Amino acid sequence: MNPTVHIDPRPEAMSDVPGVCELPLTRAVVQYRDVHEIDLAGGRIQDIGLALVLEGRYASSAEAIDLGSADVKLLDLSSELVVLDWAYEPTIDHVAALVREAASGERKGLERFCFRLALRILERSGYGPLTRPTLLRIGFRDVCRDLDLHEGTSVRIVMGTGRIVRAHLDYDGNALVFRTVTADRDPVLEGVLEGAFSTGDLRRLVPASPSASGGYQVRFPLPLSLEEALEEMAEIREGLAGLLARFEPERHRTVERITRTFGRRETLAHLHVRPSSTRFLPVEEGEPPRPASPPRPQPSAQEPFGSGAVH
């Protein structure tokens, strides 16, 4: 028995953020939403929103490295947070050594190691509600790199003079968002979106201010497995390519020629995620229903239950 009445003070790790988890976040692999995503819809093309915390004693200014871009960031992790995994100390030491090498101009080794680490973590965690946003972001990043590589994770479509539409994916809501210049309705865009994304639910975005930009949202059914996520990415790719073919045929021909030469980027298709033990098959129209099993015979009123003799 410890006779002392002394109560241990709060750990120094989280002393600057009262009332939150007391666990230091060093070595944690976290999903984050950085401030830059507010200014750049969909985030930067290099980032994947999955970071390894290098120094997390103070949650209000944790030092983390994005496992897609290999950029070291100062993140405020004191708000709601998803921790997918934890790295070992040797991994932290190796990443720190690669960061020091990258400071001298050699970044390729750091970028390759970080992205391989991200894929191993996603494979170990498996496909589920926690990993779905990151996997969708990686898949849509491949689509953007094939169709319209630029700083943002979005696809720009020029519908005419001064009519530029930007499409980005809402990773948490699983919806493709098309931003227009004005808040006015666009019947032409509505028609092509309905034709390009037949399985999606088309909604119009109505901003609070008439002077703000508007747009449209295509909501997709929630993918419950990696296979369904791959099917959704394929539909998004084909739909966006169809929009390019209609409004920018010359650009579409260039993209098709490059894709035929170098192939499509399919990062998600190379993941080795544990398959689900349950299969979900669509019920085809016109398929005859399975015959019901015959009812069990019931005892008659004249013959009480258990009237048979037992010898």
Image (spheres, rainbow, N blue to C red):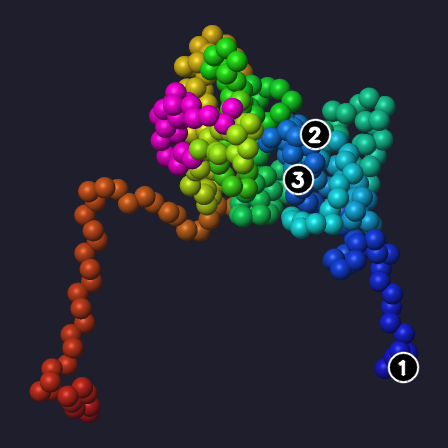
Foreground residue among 91 and 231: 231
* Disc 3/disc 1 C-alpha distance (Å): 47 Å
Q: Secondary structure at mark 3?
A: loop
> Where does the image place residue 273, in percent across and percent down from the top left?
54, 42
Q: Are marks 1 and 2 in contact (CB under 8 Å)?
A: no
Left or right: 210 as drawn, with respect to 307: right
Q: In the picture, residue 202 is in which quadrant?
A: top left
The circle drawn on residue 69 is 2
Foreground residue among 29 and 309: 29
Foreground residue among 137 and 288: 137
Q: Secondary structure at mark 1?
A: loop
Q: Which residue is mark 1?
A: 3
Q: Residues within 10 Å of mark 3 (few under 14, many from 20)?
A: some
* Disc 3/disc 2 C-alpha distance (Å): 14 Å
The circle drawn on residue 33 is 3
Q: Amino acid at mark 1?
A: Pro
* Disc 1/disc 2 C-alpha distance (Å): 53 Å
> Where does the image place residue 310, in percent across and percent down from the top left?
20, 90
**Which region of the structure is painted magenta?**
182-203
Q: Amino acid at mark 2?
A: Ser
Which badge, 3 or 2, comes first in the chain's sequence?
Answer: 3
Report the residue that reaches farthest toward the left.
Answer: 302
Left or right: 186 as drawn, with respect to 270: left
